[in-house]
């Protein structure tokens, strides 16, 4: 697993600053165990499921760094509990990301068209590792 000390420290720093309001999950190629992932995908799950745009923007900006030359791609997904309960295949998710320095909202499936082109499908289990 590509969980480095730098990624662990980043999450620890976020927990220190934002308390226990969030859970952090490694997902994507990292969670699937790829030897050389293109980036470091992290899903942030807001435990209390309350919209706090200022805090979310601040948290995601804090996580917008590079670790060992790989970009940390963090996003907040309030409905991540569907994944944890294995009810994610046909759901659309609210996703909050930083684009051009601002918090942006989009709605998408967990396996979007780009992921499907890479060979991922709903027949596969969704891999994640809580940090």
Image (cartoon, rainbow, N blue to C red):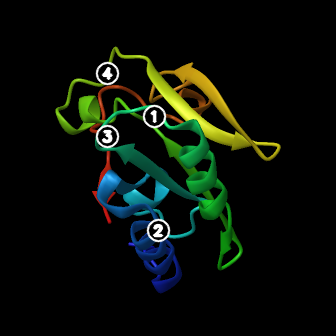
Q: Secondary structure at mark 4?
A: loop
Q: Residues within 10 Å of mark 4 (few under 14, many from 20)?
A: some
Q: Earlier in the sequence, mark 3 or mark 4?
A: 4
Q: Find the distance from the CA under tag 2 to the CA under tag 4.
A: 33 Å
Q: Find the distance from the CA under tag 2 to the CA under tag 3.
A: 29 Å
Q: Residue under label 2, please give it.
A: 17
User: Of 9 and 111, which appears nearest the observer?
Assistant: 9
Q: Is residue 14 left or right of residue 74?
A: left
The numbered dot on residue 120 is: 1
Q: Earlier in the sequence, mark 2 or mark 1?
A: 2
Question: In the orientation shown, which residue stands out farthest toward the right?
Answer: 100
Q: Is residue 113 left or right of residue 94?
A: right
Q: Is residue 69 left or right of residue 114?
A: right
Q: Secondary structure at mark 3?
A: loop
Q: Is residue 84 visible?
A: yes
**Residue ID at (65%, 79%):** 68
Q: Find the distance from the CA under tag 1 to the CA under tag 3.
A: 10 Å
The answer to whether the residue labelled 4 contacts the one labelled 1, judged by CB atoms less than 8 Å apart, is no
Q: Residue under label 3, please give it.
A: 126
**Of tags 4 and 1, which is closer to the observer?**
4
The answer to whether the residue labelled 2 contacts the one labelled 4, judged by CB atoms less than 8 Å apart, is no
Q: Find the distance from the CA under tag 2 to the CA under tag 1.
A: 35 Å
Q: Residue under label 4, please give it.
A: 89
Q: Is residue 118 left or right of residue 125?
A: right
84 above or below 33?
Answer: above
Q: Earlier in the sequence, mark 2 or mark 3?
A: 2
User: Of 46 and 107, which appears nearest the observer?
Assistant: 46
Q: Residues within 10 Å of mark 3 (few under 14, many from 20)?
A: some
Quarter of the rendering containing residue 120 = top left
Q: Find the distance from the CA under tag 3 to the CA under tag 4.
A: 9 Å
The answer to whether the residue labelled 3 contacts the one labelled 4, judged by CB atoms less than 8 Å apart, is no
């Amino acid at each position: 697993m590509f969980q480095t000390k730098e990624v662990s420290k980043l999450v620890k720093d976020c927990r220190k600053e934002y308390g226990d309001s969030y859970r952090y999950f490694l997902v994507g190629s990292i969670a699937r165990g790829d030897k050389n992932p293109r980036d470091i995908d992290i899903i942030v799950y807001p435990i209390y499921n309350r919209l706090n745009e200022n805090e979310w923007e601040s948290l995601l900006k804090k996580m917008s760094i590079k670790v060992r030359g790989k970009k940390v791609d963090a996003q907040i997904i309030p409905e991540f509990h569907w994944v944890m309960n294995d009810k994610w295949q046909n759901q659309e998710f609210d996703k909050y990301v930083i684009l051009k320095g601002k918090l942006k909202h989009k709605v998408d499936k967990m396996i979007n068209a780009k992921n499907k082109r890479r060979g991922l499908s709903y027949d596969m289990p969704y891999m994640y590792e809580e940090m």
